Amino acid sequence: MKVIDLTATLNEKMDVYPGDPAVTIEKVHTFDKNGWELRRLTLGTHTGTHVDAFSHMHKGKANVDEIPIERFFGEAQVVQKDSQWPREIGLFFTEPLDETYIDKLLHAKPSFVGGDMTERLERMLLANDIITYTDLINLEKIPFHQSFTFYGLPLKIEKGDGSPVRAIAIL
């Protein structure tokens, strides 16, 4: 068994989408003063490696706390955009993907899709109840078309439109 971390490290210098809150990590308690450490995090729900709930781009659709937990993990493959794709498993892409691939994606019926997607494609996937993951790292370490188990569990944020995740691939 091999575990590959697909998660970008949260830090105050990371880029965020224009208009989103900057990341701040403030030390609130210290060992010297309090006998323990504690930090306060300020960040948006779509910061770093994250999952998008259907409600992110569609009013009235399910929030992250309403989507069954089983939807956030499962069998997956890293595939090339112009190759044949397996059906009904998660699909990840190392190449940028745009809305011209929506018909092929809908035909494949993936449980979730991850990678560098245009906003329009992301909107179309979420409209079709396909979960999207963005800002993943290390996908190139997974061989193309090799099945693995993916986990990208969100925080259970009430009425959450998305959540940072700790994403991993188990080969």
Image (spheres, helix red, strand yellow):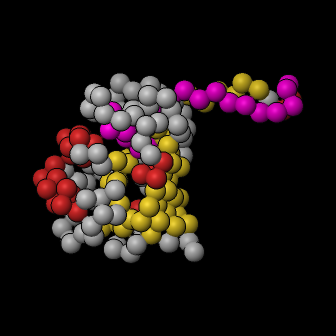
Residue 162 in view here = no
Question: Is residue 99 shown to the viewer in this render?
Answer: yes
Q: How many marks?
A: 0
Residue at 52% x, 37% y: name it: 156
Vertical placement of residue 148 versus 8, above or below: below
Q: Which residues are magenta?
A: 33-55
Q: Position of residue 94 (x, y in %)?
A: 32, 60
Q: In this picture, is 68 found above or below 84?
A: above
What is the quadrant of residue 27 in the picture? top right
Q: In this view of the protein, which residue sits in the foreground, 65 or 49?
A: 65
Q: Is residue 50 magenta?
A: yes
Where is residue 58? Give x, y as percent. Answer: 26, 32
The answer to whether 101 appears left or right of 152 in the picture is left
The residue positioned 23% from the left and 45% from the top of the image is 128
In the picture shown, does residue 120 fall above or below 85?
A: above
Residue at (20%, 71%) from the top-left corner?
Answer: 83
Frontmost residue, 16 versus 64: 64
In the rendered image, the quadrant that contains the N terminus is bottom right
x 41%, y 65%: residue: 75
On screen, residue 70 versus residue 86, left or right, reads right
Residue 40 on image: x %, y %: 64, 27
Which percent across, then down, holds residue 47?
A: 45, 37
Whether 22 is among the magenta residues is no
> Which quadrant of the structure image shows residue 145?
bottom left
